[in-house]
Amino acid sequence: MGGPIVECVPNVSEGRDWSVLDRIAGAVRSVRGVTLADIHADSDHHRSVFTILGPPPDVESAALAAAEAALGAIDMQRHRGFHPRIGAVDVLPFIPLCSAAMGEVVALAHRVGETLGARWALPVYFYGEAALDPERRRLSEIRRGGYEQIEARLAVFPPDAGVARFNARSGGAAVGAREILVAYNVWLGSDDLAVARAIARTVRESSGGLPGVEAMGVPLPSRGCVQVSMNLLDYRRTPLPLLFERVRSEAARLGVRVRRAELVGLAPRQAFAGEPPERAGLPEFTPGKLLESYLPGERL
């Protein structure tokens, strides 16, 4: 890949049926010029995250292909999972890499959102750098109340694109543009959700914790444990080893051990601050999980 490169990370509300995930992956791979670098599926979250990289026009086509495959296969009326979500294509962010400009990615997000809203009669909201309203920059504001509250909220929270009508099968979609985000989870040796939530409050920035960290406690009943699920919005200020050690120390203070950590998607090399991945609780980490592995000259 030469020239500007864009990353797209569709988050879809399906984490159990691999026939659906394979259909989405096939739709992405059918677009020439893009690389499907990673698929992360979680049955308890009932959610999957796809990582797509390539030139802007090709990524735009692949994002639409992925979203339309997901919308054609997922029925939100039957969806039950532990991760916040508003629709089948819950989040569709675009990230500029290499020489891509944020303005170009914002325009791309707007085109994709307008297309999805029109073709699928969806309420579509723009967030992050693509937000049309400053109050909609934060994804948490768009997701407030989840899928179950979309119909009630439409009158007071109209969409930016698509239709202001509840789509029971597909819900809504949040389409955005943002900088690099690292999604990272730590599993605890406990099934006490209160412990995971207490640790999340300690580490997240909004509660006085670490800079650029969002965190929540999530149950993983199929694994018999709970998880601290985190987004690292500023990996330069809070690298992964620092975050892992903070979670580990808080867990120890509460009498709980850490079972393992996991990376959702890819991470830039700088997120490890020169430390081995083991220091972030990732002993099985491979070079294929480094974002730079897919970029020309391995440079962001």
Image (cartoon, rainbow, N blue to C red):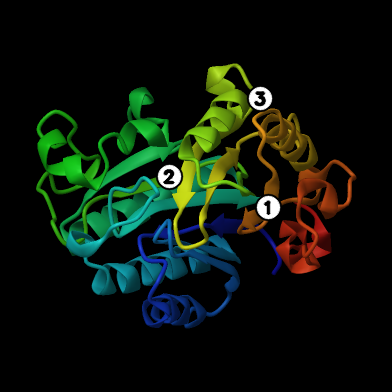
* Label 2 crowd (10 A; few <14 / some 14-19 / many >=20): many
Q: Nearer the viewer, mark 1 or mark 2?
A: 1
Going by the image, does 172 lie left or right of 67? left
> Disc 1 or 2, which lies upstream in sequence?
2
Q: Position of residue 160 (x, y in %)?
A: 25, 40
Determine which of the numbered discs, if any, sits on residue 211 in the image.
3
> Which residue lies at the image location 32% right of the left edge and 36% below the top edge?
142
Q: Are marks 3 and 2 in contact (CB under 8 Å)?
A: no
Vertical relation: 134 (above or below) 166: above
Q: Earlier in the sequence, mark 3 or mark 2?
A: 2
Identify residue type, mark 1. Answer: Arg
Circle 2 sits in a helix, a strand or a loop, which is it? strand
Residue 67 horizontal side relative to residue 186, left or right = left
Element marked by disc 1: strand
Q: Return the residue at label 2.
A: 176
For the N terminus, which image quadrant? bottom right
Q: Quadrant of residue 52?
A: bottom right
Name the side, left or right, on which 45 lies relative to 163.
Answer: right
Which label is found at residue 207? Answer: none
Q: What numbered label is drawn on residue 259?
A: 1
Using the image as rendered, state which of residue 204 and residue 159 is in the foreground: 204
